[in-house]
Image (tube, grey):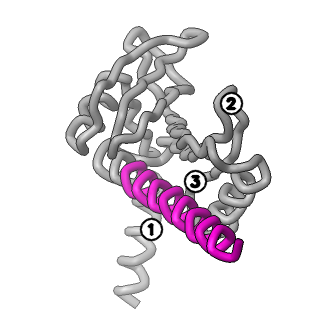
Amino acid sequence: MARRFTLSLLLMAASLAPPAFAELVTANQLRDELAKYGAEAMEISYEDGHPVLTGEMLGQAFDVALSDCEGPQNACRALRYVSCHEMADFSRIEALEIANTHNAGYRDTTAFAEEKWFGQVVCLRLQQEFRGETEFGLRQVFEWQIELEDFLQEMDDARAVKQAANSLDNSAD
């Protein structure tokens, strides 16, 4: 009986506690956190009034658009990371197959293919929101780094498979 009463009091106290609000993140804070994980050549610009950070991590260029921002510091509740990998020697169908294979797995990211003037690119997108999060930092940047590493490995694997297939085709001739 006493345990039930204590548990009820704890649950009631928790329900009366103010909701946890996300700690907003500025482009400067994001740049500093990314630098801790080896990101380089980072620049902050503004597109349509929203901060955008560009840089390079693991030898791969990326952009991070910050959104749902407020205040004079442009502190934001959402980030959208995007990195595109050139696959110029791949056809449109091959690039789409790579993106679809990525998307078929259990991931927090989305891949998509685009055609550029020089050929195909396969892009990775990760959306993060800080509603209910208490602190921006380690988890969010680490998640991007891991997803980017996995993506780059997928691109290397796709290139190796294509090279092996081309070698087999050439040896059959």
Q: In the image, what residue type sits under mark 2?
A: Lys
x%, y% of residue 69?
Answer: 51, 22
Label at residue 109: 3
Q: Is residue 102 above or below residue 114?
A: below
Q: Is residue 56 above or below residue 132?
A: above
The quadrant where residue 84 appears: top right
Which range is magenta?
144-173
Question: Which residue reaches farthest left?
Answer: 36
| C-alpha gap between disc 2 and disc 3 | 22 Å
Which residue is disc 2 drawn over? 116
Residue at 36% across, 77% down: 6
x%, y% of residue 101?
Answer: 67, 65
Residue at 54% across, 36% down: 80
Relative side of 150 to 126, left or right: left
Question: Which residue reaches farthest bottom?
Answer: 1
Which residue is disc 1 drawn over? 11
SS type, badge 3: strand
* Placement of the N terminus among the 4 image quadrants: bottom left
